[in-house]
Image: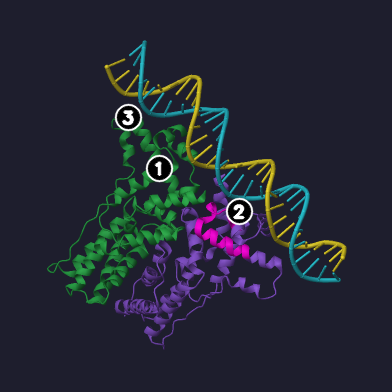
Chain colours: A green, B purple, C cyan, D yellow
Amino acid sequence: MSVVYAAFVKSKLISVLFLSVICYGVDVFRSYIYKKLKMKEKKLTRSQFKHASIIQAATLEFQEKGFKVASMDDIAKRAEVSKRTVYNHFASKELLFEAILEEMLTMLSAFEQVPFSLTVPLELQLRSLVDNEISLLKGDGFLPTAKVILGELMHSPELMTNVMQTFNKQESPLTVWFNEACEAGALKCADPEIVVTQFIAVIKGFCFWPQLVQGEEFPNEQKSALIAQTAVEMILKQYT
Amino acid sequence: MSVVYAAFVKSKLISVLFLSVICYGVDVFRSYIYKKLKMKEKKLTRSQFKHASIIQAATLEFQEKGFKVASMDDIAKRAEVSKRTVYNHFASKELLFEAILEEMLTMLSAFEQVPFSLTVPLELQLRSLVDNEISLLKGDGFLPTAKVILGELMHSPELMTNVMQTFNKQESPLTVWFNEACEAGALKCADPEIVVTQFIAVIKGFCFWPQLVQGEEFPNEQKSALIAQTAVEMILKQYT
DNA sequence: CATAAACTACACTCACAAGTTTACTTCAAG
DNA sequence: CTTGAAGTAAACTTGTGAGTGTAGTTTATG
Protein backbone atom coordinates (compact mmCIF):
# COMPACT_ATOMS: atom_id res chain seq x y z
CA MET A 1 0.00 0.00 0.00
CA SER A 2 2.98 2.23 0.33
CA VAL A 3 3.11 1.98 -3.43
CA VAL A 4 -0.23 3.73 -3.46
CA TYR A 5 1.17 6.36 -1.14
CA ALA A 6 4.18 6.96 -3.32
CA ALA A 7 2.01 7.13 -6.40
CA PHE A 8 -0.20 9.66 -4.72
CA VAL A 9 2.60 11.91 -3.69
CA LYS A 10 3.98 11.62 -7.15
CA SER A 11 0.82 12.41 -9.02
CA LYS A 12 -0.14 15.27 -6.79
CA LEU A 13 3.16 16.96 -6.43
CA ILE A 14 4.28 16.60 -9.97
CA SER A 15 1.92 19.36 -10.84
CA VAL A 16 3.63 21.46 -8.25
CA LEU A 17 6.20 22.77 -10.60
CA PHE A 18 6.36 25.91 -8.59
CA LEU A 19 8.68 23.96 -6.41
CA SER A 20 11.40 25.71 -8.27
CA VAL A 21 10.22 28.75 -6.43
CA ILE A 22 11.83 27.23 -3.41
CA CYS A 23 14.93 25.86 -5.00
CA TYR A 24 15.77 28.78 -7.19
CA GLY A 25 15.23 32.46 -6.88
CA VAL A 26 11.89 34.14 -6.81
CA ASP A 27 10.82 37.64 -6.36
CA VAL A 28 7.81 39.16 -4.77
CA PHE A 29 5.80 37.37 -2.23
CA ARG A 30 2.57 38.42 -0.63
CA SER A 31 1.84 37.24 2.85
CA TYR A 32 -1.78 37.03 3.65
CA ILE A 33 -2.01 33.52 4.97
CA TYR A 34 -4.25 32.65 7.86
CA LYS A 35 -5.96 35.98 7.72
CA LYS A 36 -8.90 34.02 6.51
CA LEU A 37 -9.78 33.32 10.08
CA LYS A 38 -10.50 36.95 10.63
CA MET A 39 -13.70 36.20 8.84
CA LYS A 40 -15.16 35.59 12.23
CA GLU A 41 -15.76 39.29 12.18
CA LYS A 42 -17.00 39.35 8.63
CA LYS A 43 -20.22 37.66 7.74
CA LEU A 44 -19.17 34.13 6.96
CA THR A 45 -21.44 31.17 6.74
CA ARG A 46 -20.81 28.52 9.35
CA SER A 47 -19.71 26.19 6.60
CA GLN A 48 -17.11 28.60 5.22
CA PHE A 49 -15.79 29.22 8.67
CA LYS A 50 -15.39 25.51 9.40
CA HIS A 51 -13.72 25.05 6.06
CA ALA A 52 -11.15 27.67 6.89
CA SER A 53 -10.55 26.24 10.35
CA ILE A 54 -9.88 22.83 8.88
CA ILE A 55 -7.42 24.21 6.38
CA GLN A 56 -5.60 26.11 9.06
CA ALA A 57 -5.43 23.14 11.41
CA ALA A 58 -4.39 20.74 8.68
CA THR A 59 -1.70 23.09 7.48
CA LEU A 60 -0.19 23.10 10.93
CA GLU A 61 -0.45 19.34 11.25
CA PHE A 62 1.19 18.64 7.92
CA GLN A 63 3.89 21.14 8.69
CA GLU A 64 4.70 19.61 12.02
CA LYS A 65 4.38 15.95 11.16
CA GLY A 66 4.47 15.45 7.43
CA PHE A 67 1.78 13.79 5.35
CA LYS A 68 1.92 10.28 6.71
CA VAL A 69 2.22 11.01 10.41
CA ALA A 70 -0.42 13.71 10.50
CA SER A 71 -3.74 12.24 11.58
CA MET A 72 -7.22 13.23 10.56
CA ASP A 73 -8.45 12.86 14.12
CA ASP A 74 -5.86 15.32 15.35
CA ILE A 75 -6.69 17.72 12.56
CA ALA A 76 -10.36 17.56 13.55
CA LYS A 77 -9.54 18.16 17.21
CA ARG A 78 -7.25 21.03 16.35
CA ALA A 79 -9.84 22.64 14.13
CA GLU A 80 -12.45 22.15 16.88
CA VAL A 81 -14.64 20.42 14.40
CA SER A 82 -16.03 16.92 14.22
CA LYS A 83 -14.14 14.40 12.19
CA ARG A 84 -17.19 13.87 10.05
CA THR A 85 -17.17 17.53 9.12
CA VAL A 86 -13.62 17.25 7.94
CA TYR A 87 -14.69 14.46 5.63
CA ASN A 88 -17.71 16.43 4.48
CA HIS A 89 -15.37 19.16 3.27
CA PHE A 90 -12.55 16.99 2.00
CA ALA A 91 -13.26 13.50 0.78
CA SER A 92 -9.88 12.14 1.80
CA LYS A 93 -6.60 12.97 3.45
CA GLU A 94 -5.03 13.13 0.01
CA LEU A 95 -7.51 15.69 -1.22
CA LEU A 96 -7.08 17.76 1.90
CA PHE A 97 -3.34 17.74 1.40
CA GLU A 98 -3.76 18.68 -2.20
CA ALA A 99 -6.08 21.54 -1.33
CA ILE A 100 -3.54 22.89 1.10
CA LEU A 101 -0.71 22.63 -1.38
CA GLU A 102 -2.73 24.58 -3.87
CA GLU A 103 -3.61 27.15 -1.27
CA MET A 104 0.03 27.58 -0.42
CA LEU A 105 1.26 27.69 -3.94
CA THR A 106 -1.13 30.35 -5.10
CA MET A 107 0.51 32.51 -2.47
CA LEU A 108 3.87 31.90 -4.02
CA SER A 109 2.90 32.39 -7.60
CA ALA A 110 3.25 36.16 -7.63
CA PHE A 111 6.32 36.47 -9.77
CA GLU A 112 7.84 39.74 -10.70
CA GLN A 113 10.17 39.86 -13.62
CA VAL A 114 13.04 42.26 -13.08
CA PRO A 115 14.52 43.20 -16.44
CA PHE A 116 18.17 44.02 -16.73
CA SER A 117 18.78 47.67 -17.44
CA LEU A 118 21.86 49.33 -18.89
CA THR A 119 21.12 52.71 -17.39
CA VAL A 120 20.43 51.89 -13.76
CA PRO A 121 23.66 51.28 -11.81
CA LEU A 122 24.45 47.61 -11.34
CA GLU A 123 24.66 47.94 -7.60
CA LEU A 124 21.15 49.28 -7.35
CA GLN A 125 19.74 46.55 -9.53
CA LEU A 126 21.47 43.84 -7.56
CA ARG A 127 20.36 45.44 -4.37
CA SER A 128 16.75 45.30 -5.42
CA LEU A 129 17.13 41.67 -6.48
CA VAL A 130 18.47 40.77 -3.05
CA ASP A 131 15.79 42.69 -1.28
CA ASN A 132 13.10 40.94 -3.26
CA GLU A 133 14.59 37.58 -2.52
CA ILE A 134 14.93 38.26 1.18
CA SER A 135 11.44 39.58 1.57
CA LEU A 136 10.15 36.51 -0.23
CA LEU A 137 11.99 34.22 2.13
CA LYS A 138 10.81 36.26 5.07
CA GLY A 139 7.16 36.09 4.08
CA ASP A 140 4.83 34.41 6.55
CA GLY A 141 3.91 31.45 4.45
CA PHE A 142 7.16 30.66 2.71
CA LEU A 143 8.98 28.59 5.27
CA PRO A 144 5.97 26.46 6.25
CA THR A 145 5.27 25.79 2.60
CA ALA A 146 8.85 24.81 2.01
CA LYS A 147 8.75 22.48 5.00
CA VAL A 148 5.67 20.68 3.81
CA ILE A 149 6.86 20.27 0.25
CA LEU A 150 10.49 19.48 0.89
CA GLY A 151 9.56 17.16 3.72
CA GLU A 152 7.53 15.04 1.34
CA LEU A 153 9.89 15.32 -1.58
CA MET A 154 13.10 14.52 0.19
CA HIS A 155 12.29 10.84 0.28
CA SER A 156 11.40 10.45 -3.38
CA PRO A 157 14.38 11.33 -5.53
CA GLU A 158 12.91 10.20 -8.85
CA LEU A 159 10.04 12.56 -8.32
CA MET A 160 12.37 15.42 -7.63
CA THR A 161 14.48 14.85 -10.68
CA ASN A 162 11.33 14.62 -12.78
CA VAL A 163 10.07 17.89 -11.46
CA MET A 164 13.36 19.60 -11.96
CA GLN A 165 13.81 18.29 -15.45
CA THR A 166 10.41 19.54 -16.42
CA PHE A 167 10.83 22.93 -14.91
CA ASN A 168 13.93 24.31 -16.47
CA LYS A 169 16.08 26.57 -14.38
CA GLN A 170 16.08 29.10 -17.17
CA GLU A 171 12.65 30.23 -16.18
CA SER A 172 13.65 31.77 -12.89
CA PRO A 173 13.51 35.57 -13.05
CA LEU A 174 16.85 35.82 -11.31
CA THR A 175 18.43 33.59 -13.91
CA VAL A 176 16.96 35.72 -16.64
CA TRP A 177 18.41 38.88 -15.13
CA PHE A 178 21.88 37.40 -14.73
CA ASN A 179 21.84 36.01 -18.24
CA GLU A 180 20.98 39.40 -19.62
CA ALA A 181 23.58 41.11 -17.47
CA CYS A 182 26.26 38.73 -18.72
CA GLU A 183 25.26 39.08 -22.34
CA ALA A 184 25.31 42.83 -22.02
CA GLY A 185 28.83 42.56 -20.67
CA ALA A 186 27.94 44.22 -17.40
CA LEU A 187 29.05 41.09 -15.58
CA LYS A 188 32.14 39.26 -16.71
CA CYS A 189 31.53 35.61 -16.22
CA ALA A 190 31.87 32.44 -18.19
CA ASP A 191 28.78 30.78 -16.82
CA PRO A 192 25.86 32.87 -15.55
CA GLU A 193 24.33 29.79 -13.97
CA ILE A 194 27.15 29.57 -11.50
CA VAL A 195 26.79 33.22 -10.60
CA VAL A 196 23.09 32.89 -9.93
CA THR A 197 23.64 29.86 -7.77
CA GLN A 198 26.30 31.69 -5.78
CA PHE A 199 24.11 34.71 -5.40
CA ILE A 200 21.20 32.69 -4.11
CA ALA A 201 23.43 30.52 -1.95
CA VAL A 202 24.83 33.49 -0.12
CA ILE A 203 21.34 34.66 0.70
CA LYS A 204 19.83 31.31 1.56
CA GLY A 205 22.82 30.37 3.65
CA PHE A 206 21.55 32.98 6.10
CA CYS A 207 17.86 33.35 5.42
CA PHE A 208 16.54 29.96 4.48
CA TRP A 209 18.48 26.81 5.28
CA PRO A 210 19.23 27.60 8.91
CA GLN A 211 15.56 28.40 9.45
CA LEU A 212 14.38 25.30 7.63
CA VAL A 213 16.75 22.85 9.17
CA GLN A 214 17.64 24.28 12.54
CA GLY A 215 14.62 26.37 13.39
CA GLU A 216 16.84 29.38 13.64
CA GLU A 217 15.31 32.85 13.91
CA PHE A 218 15.10 34.96 10.79
CA PRO A 219 17.87 37.59 10.84
CA ASN A 220 16.75 40.97 12.14
CA GLU A 221 16.62 44.16 10.08
CA GLN A 222 20.21 45.09 10.79
CA LYS A 223 21.65 41.70 10.01
CA SER A 224 19.48 41.33 6.92
CA ALA A 225 20.85 44.60 5.62
CA LEU A 226 24.38 43.42 6.21
CA ILE A 227 23.71 40.13 4.46
CA ALA A 228 22.20 41.90 1.49
CA GLN A 229 25.10 44.31 1.33
CA THR A 230 27.74 41.58 1.33
CA ALA A 231 25.86 39.56 -1.26
CA VAL A 232 25.85 42.50 -3.62
CA GLU A 233 29.49 43.32 -2.95
CA MET A 234 30.47 39.76 -3.53
CA ILE A 235 29.00 39.73 -7.01
CA LEU A 236 30.40 43.14 -7.89
CA LYS A 237 33.90 42.41 -6.64
CA GLN A 238 34.09 39.09 -8.37
CA TYR A 239 32.42 39.73 -11.68
CA THR A 240 33.08 43.34 -12.68
CA MET B 1 0.69 7.71 20.65
CA SER B 2 2.37 10.14 18.34
CA VAL B 3 3.62 11.71 21.54
CA VAL B 4 5.58 8.54 22.11
CA TYR B 5 6.96 8.78 18.60
CA ALA B 6 8.02 12.37 19.09
CA ALA B 7 9.59 11.52 22.43
CA PHE B 8 11.53 8.72 20.84
CA VAL B 9 12.90 10.81 18.05
CA LYS B 10 13.78 13.45 20.59
CA SER B 11 15.56 11.21 23.03
CA LYS B 12 17.47 9.35 20.39
CA LEU B 13 18.50 12.20 18.21
CA ILE B 14 19.38 14.61 20.93
CA SER B 15 22.51 12.61 21.48
CA VAL B 16 23.29 13.07 17.84
CA LEU B 17 25.04 16.32 18.32
CA PHE B 18 27.17 15.58 15.35
CA LEU B 19 24.29 16.95 13.43
CA SER B 20 26.31 20.08 13.28
CA VAL B 21 28.52 18.17 10.96
CA ILE B 22 25.79 18.56 8.44
CA CYS B 23 24.76 22.09 9.15
CA TYR B 24 28.17 23.60 9.54
CA GLY B 25 31.49 22.82 8.05
CA VAL B 26 33.44 19.69 8.59
CA ASP B 27 36.59 18.41 7.18
CA VAL B 28 37.77 14.99 6.34
CA PHE B 29 35.41 12.20 5.67
CA ARG B 30 36.19 8.57 5.12
CA SER B 31 33.81 6.60 2.97
CA TYR B 32 33.75 2.97 3.78
CA ILE B 33 30.04 2.38 4.11
CA TYR B 34 28.44 -0.77 2.79
CA LYS B 35 31.77 -2.41 2.31
CA LYS B 36 30.72 -4.58 5.18
CA LEU B 37 28.83 -6.72 2.76
CA LYS B 38 32.02 -7.74 1.11
CA MET B 39 32.37 -10.03 4.06
CA LYS B 40 30.69 -12.64 1.94
CA GLU B 41 34.17 -13.33 0.72
CA LYS B 42 35.74 -13.12 4.13
CA LYS B 43 34.91 -15.65 6.77
CA LEU B 44 31.83 -14.27 8.42
CA THR B 45 29.43 -16.19 10.57
CA ARG B 46 25.94 -16.51 9.18
CA SER B 47 24.69 -14.34 12.01
CA GLN B 48 27.11 -11.52 11.29
CA PHE B 49 26.22 -11.63 7.66
CA LYS B 50 22.50 -11.40 8.35
CA HIS B 51 23.13 -8.57 10.75
CA ALA B 52 24.95 -6.61 8.06
CA SER B 53 22.25 -7.33 5.48
CA ILE B 54 19.60 -6.00 7.81
CA ILE B 55 21.52 -2.83 8.49
CA GLN B 56 22.05 -2.25 4.82
CA ALA B 57 18.42 -2.86 3.93
CA ALA B 58 17.12 -0.76 6.79
CA THR B 59 19.42 2.09 5.90
CA LEU B 60 17.95 2.16 2.44
CA GLU B 61 14.41 1.97 3.73
CA PHE B 62 14.83 4.78 6.22
CA GLN B 63 16.52 6.86 3.58
CA GLU B 64 13.75 6.41 1.09
CA LYS B 65 10.77 6.59 3.39
CA GLY B 66 11.72 8.11 6.70
CA PHE B 67 11.27 6.50 10.09
CA LYS B 68 7.52 6.25 10.25
CA VAL B 69 6.75 5.10 6.74
CA ALA B 70 9.50 2.51 6.57
CA SER B 71 8.11 -0.91 7.45
CA MET B 72 9.81 -3.78 9.20
CA ASP B 73 8.28 -6.26 6.78
CA ASP B 74 9.77 -4.44 3.84
CA ILE B 75 13.13 -4.24 5.55
CA ALA B 76 13.03 -7.99 6.11
CA LYS B 77 12.12 -8.66 2.49
CA ARG B 78 14.81 -6.32 1.26
CA ALA B 79 17.43 -7.95 3.45
CA GLU B 80 16.25 -11.36 2.24
CA VAL B 81 15.83 -12.38 5.82
CA SER B 82 12.84 -13.48 7.84
CA LYS B 83 11.08 -10.85 9.89
CA ARG B 84 11.79 -12.83 13.02
CA THR B 85 15.48 -12.62 12.34
CA VAL B 86 15.25 -8.87 12.15
CA TYR B 87 13.69 -8.88 15.59
CA ASN B 88 16.29 -11.28 16.88
CA HIS B 89 18.97 -8.78 15.98
CA PHE B 90 17.12 -5.61 16.87
CA ALA B 91 14.45 -5.66 19.55
CA SER B 92 12.42 -2.88 17.98
CA LYS B 93 12.18 -0.50 15.07
CA GLU B 94 13.44 2.27 17.34
CA LEU B 95 16.55 0.33 18.27
CA LEU B 96 17.22 -0.54 14.67
CA PHE B 97 16.96 3.10 13.71
CA GLU B 98 19.22 4.07 16.54
CA ALA B 99 21.80 1.47 15.55
CA ILE B 100 21.83 2.83 12.04
CA LEU B 101 22.20 6.40 13.20
CA GLU B 102 25.18 5.42 15.27
CA GLU B 103 26.65 3.49 12.39
CA MET B 104 26.31 6.49 10.15
CA LEU B 105 27.62 8.97 12.61
CA THR B 106 30.76 7.12 13.43
CA MET B 107 31.57 7.50 9.77
CA LEU B 108 31.22 11.23 10.05
CA SER B 109 33.18 11.69 13.20
CA ALA B 110 36.56 11.84 11.59
CA PHE B 111 37.35 15.49 12.14
CA GLU B 112 40.54 17.08 11.11
CA GLN B 113 41.50 20.37 12.63
CA VAL B 114 43.17 22.70 10.18
CA PRO B 115 45.13 25.32 12.11
CA PHE B 116 45.56 28.77 10.71
CA SER B 117 49.10 29.47 9.64
CA LEU B 118 50.79 32.80 9.09
CA THR B 119 53.42 31.41 6.78
CA VAL B 120 51.39 29.40 4.29
CA PRO B 121 49.73 31.68 1.69
CA LEU B 122 46.08 32.38 2.42
CA GLU B 123 44.95 31.12 -0.92
CA LEU B 124 46.50 27.72 -0.35
CA GLN B 125 44.97 27.38 3.06
CA LEU B 126 41.55 28.34 1.82
CA ARG B 127 41.93 26.00 -1.05
CA SER B 128 42.61 23.08 1.21
CA LEU B 129 39.65 24.00 3.39
CA VAL B 130 37.35 23.97 0.37
CA ASP B 131 38.77 20.72 -0.89
CA ASN B 132 38.24 19.09 2.47
CA GLU B 133 34.69 20.32 2.63
CA ILE B 134 33.87 19.18 -0.87
CA SER B 135 35.32 15.75 -0.41
CA LEU B 136 33.34 15.41 2.79
CA LEU B 137 30.12 16.29 1.00
CA LYS B 138 31.03 13.96 -1.83
CA GLY B 139 31.66 10.99 0.44
CA ASP B 140 29.44 7.96 -0.13
CA GLY B 141 27.60 8.06 3.14
CA PHE B 142 27.18 11.75 3.69
CA LEU B 143 24.10 12.53 1.66
CA PRO B 144 22.11 9.48 2.80
CA THR B 145 22.93 10.29 6.39
CA ALA B 146 21.85 13.85 5.93
CA LYS B 147 18.61 12.71 4.36
CA VAL B 148 17.74 10.42 7.21
CA ILE B 149 18.56 12.90 9.92
CA LEU B 150 17.20 16.04 8.34
CA GLY B 151 14.10 14.20 7.21
CA GLU B 152 13.27 13.33 10.80
CA LEU B 153 14.38 16.62 12.26
CA MET B 154 12.64 18.93 9.90
CA HIS B 155 9.31 18.33 11.56
CA SER B 156 10.43 18.94 15.11
CA PRO B 157 11.73 22.47 15.49
CA GLU B 158 12.13 22.42 19.27
CA LEU B 159 14.42 19.45 18.94
CA MET B 160 16.52 21.21 16.37
CA THR B 161 16.93 24.35 18.38
CA ASN B 162 17.87 22.28 21.40
CA VAL B 163 20.50 20.44 19.47
CA MET B 164 21.90 23.57 17.99
CA GLN B 165 22.00 25.41 21.28
CA THR B 166 23.88 22.57 22.87
CA PHE B 167 26.36 22.18 20.11
CA ASN B 168 27.83 25.60 19.74
CA LYS B 169 28.86 26.72 16.31
CA GLN B 170 32.25 27.67 17.68
CA GLU B 171 33.31 24.07 17.63
CA SER B 172 33.37 23.68 13.91
CA PRO B 173 36.93 23.44 12.62
CA LEU B 174 36.13 25.85 9.84
CA THR B 175 34.88 28.40 12.33
CA VAL B 176 38.05 28.00 14.32
CA TRP B 177 40.20 28.62 11.29
CA PHE B 178 38.30 31.74 10.26
CA ASN B 179 38.35 33.12 13.77
CA GLU B 180 42.09 32.69 13.91
CA ALA B 181 42.54 34.21 10.49
CA CYS B 182 40.52 37.25 11.48
CA GLU B 183 42.31 37.71 14.77
CA ALA B 184 45.65 37.48 13.02
CA GLY B 185 44.47 40.21 10.67
CA ALA B 186 44.86 38.06 7.60
CA LEU B 187 41.18 38.53 6.88
CA LYS B 188 39.59 41.90 7.39
CA CYS B 189 36.13 41.32 8.63
CA ALA B 190 33.90 42.51 11.44
CA ASP B 191 32.22 39.20 12.06
CA PRO B 192 33.98 35.93 11.25
CA GLU B 193 30.74 34.05 11.71
CA ILE B 194 29.27 35.72 8.66
CA VAL B 195 32.32 34.89 6.62
CA VAL B 196 32.17 31.22 7.54
CA THR B 197 28.52 31.04 6.72
CA GLN B 198 29.16 32.63 3.33
CA PHE B 199 32.03 30.34 2.64
CA ILE B 200 30.02 27.25 3.43
CA ALA B 201 26.95 28.56 1.64
CA VAL B 202 28.84 29.01 -1.59
CA ILE B 203 30.00 25.41 -1.43
CA LYS B 204 26.77 23.84 -0.29
CA GLY B 205 24.79 25.83 -2.81
CA PHE B 206 26.42 23.61 -5.41
CA CYS B 207 27.42 20.44 -3.61
CA PHE B 208 24.81 19.74 -0.99
CA TRP B 209 21.39 21.36 -1.17
CA PRO B 210 20.68 20.61 -4.82
CA GLN B 211 21.62 16.99 -4.20
CA LEU B 212 19.58 16.75 -1.03
CA VAL B 213 16.49 18.43 -2.28
CA GLN B 214 16.45 17.86 -5.99
CA GLY B 215 18.40 14.67 -6.39
CA GLU B 216 20.82 16.51 -8.62
CA GLU B 217 24.08 14.83 -9.61
CA PHE B 218 27.21 15.75 -7.73
CA PRO B 219 29.31 18.16 -9.83
CA ASN B 220 32.05 16.46 -11.82
CA GLU B 221 35.75 17.01 -11.28
CA GLN B 222 35.96 19.99 -13.58
CA LYS B 223 32.95 21.77 -12.13
CA SER B 224 34.01 21.00 -8.58
CA ALA B 225 37.36 22.64 -9.28
CA LEU B 226 35.63 25.70 -10.65
CA ILE B 227 33.35 25.92 -7.64
CA ALA B 228 36.26 25.60 -5.27
CA GLN B 229 38.18 28.23 -7.17
CA THR B 230 35.37 30.76 -7.08
CA ALA B 231 34.70 30.15 -3.39
CA VAL B 232 38.31 30.92 -2.56
CA GLU B 233 38.37 33.98 -4.80
CA MET B 234 35.22 35.26 -3.27
CA ILE B 235 36.69 35.25 0.22
CA LEU B 236 39.98 36.71 -0.91
CA LYS B 237 38.46 39.52 -2.96
CA GLN B 238 36.05 40.52 -0.28
CA TYR B 239 38.09 40.21 2.88
CA THR B 240 41.70 41.02 2.05
C1' DC C 1 -41.87 27.96 13.56
C1' DA C 2 -40.82 24.76 10.04
C1' DT C 3 -37.51 22.93 7.03
C1' DA C 4 -33.29 21.70 4.95
C1' DA C 5 -28.49 22.00 5.07
C1' DA C 6 -24.65 21.54 7.76
C1' DC C 7 -22.56 19.99 12.16
C1' DT C 8 -21.83 16.57 16.05
C1' DA C 9 -20.94 12.34 18.76
C1' DC C 10 -20.02 7.92 18.48
C1' DA C 11 -19.83 3.45 17.06
C1' DC C 12 -18.32 0.97 13.37
C1' DT C 13 -15.37 -1.43 9.39
C1' DC C 14 -11.13 -2.14 7.34
C1' DA C 15 -6.29 -2.15 6.40
C1' DC C 16 -1.86 -2.03 7.78
C1' DA C 17 2.18 -2.45 10.49
C1' DA C 18 4.70 -3.68 15.05
C1' DG C 19 5.83 -7.28 17.42
C1' DT C 20 5.08 -12.44 19.08
C1' DT C 21 4.38 -17.43 18.94
C1' DT C 22 5.17 -21.84 17.20
C1' DA C 23 6.63 -25.68 14.76
C1' DC C 24 10.09 -26.65 11.61
C1' DT C 25 14.70 -26.24 9.00
C1' DT C 26 19.64 -25.11 8.33
C1' DC C 27 24.25 -24.87 9.60
C1' DA C 28 28.61 -25.22 11.86
C1' DA C 29 31.38 -27.47 15.40
C1' DG C 30 32.71 -31.08 18.44
C1' DC D 1 26.17 -37.60 12.94
C1' DT D 2 24.30 -35.26 16.51
C1' DT D 3 23.40 -31.19 19.01
C1' DG D 4 22.38 -26.49 19.84
C1' DA D 5 22.39 -21.89 18.01
C1' DA D 6 20.43 -19.26 14.56
C1' DG D 7 17.20 -18.82 10.76
C1' DT D 8 12.44 -19.48 8.54
C1' DA D 9 7.43 -19.28 7.37
C1' DA D 10 3.12 -18.29 8.58
C1' DA D 11 -0.43 -17.44 11.60
C1' DC D 12 -1.41 -14.55 15.26
C1' DT D 13 -2.36 -10.32 18.62
C1' DT D 14 -2.76 -5.62 19.14
C1' DG D 15 -2.91 -0.74 18.29
C1' DT D 16 -3.73 2.94 15.34
C1' DG D 17 -5.56 5.56 11.87
C1' DA D 18 -8.56 6.24 7.48
C1' DG D 19 -12.90 6.46 6.26
C1' DT D 20 -18.31 5.49 6.88
C1' DG D 21 -23.07 5.22 8.77
C1' DT D 22 -26.46 6.92 11.78
C1' DA D 23 -29.32 9.27 14.82
C1' DG D 24 -29.77 13.47 16.68
C1' DT D 25 -28.65 18.74 17.14
C1' DT D 26 -27.67 23.44 15.45
C1' DT D 27 -28.46 27.27 12.42
C1' DA D 28 -29.91 30.17 8.65
C1' DT D 29 -33.92 31.36 6.08
C1' DG D 30 -38.62 31.75 4.12
- Give, as a three-letter code, the residue at label 3: Thr
- Which x, y percent locates residue A46? 35, 29
- Which x, y percent locates residue B9? 55, 54
- Label 2 environment density (alpha carbons within 10 Å; few <14, some 14–19, many ≥20): some
Mark 3 on the same chain as mark 2: no
Asked where in the image residue D30 lies, by quadrant, the reply is top left
Q: Which residues are magenta?
A: B53-75
- Give, as a three-letter code, the residue at label 1: Leu
Mark 1 on the same chain as mark 3: yes
Tag 2 residue = B73
Question: Is residue A82 visible to us here?
Answer: no
* Left or right: B42 in relation to A114: right
Q: Is B83 situated above or below A230? A: above
Q: Is residue B69 magenta?
A: yes
Residue furthest to the left in view is A119
- Which x, y percent locates residue A211? 40, 58
Tag 3–tag 2 contact (CB < 8 Å): no
Chain holding disc 3: A
> The residue tagged with tag 2: helix, strand or loop?
helix
Q: Is B127 situated above or below A88? A: below
Q: Closer to the camera, B93 or B10?
A: B93
Asked where in the image residue B182 lies, by quadrant, the reply is bottom left
Q: Main secondary structure of the magenta part?
A: helix
* Left or right: B7 in relation to B88: left
- Give, as a three-letter code, the residue at label 2: Asp
Which mark lies nearer to you, 1 or 3? 1
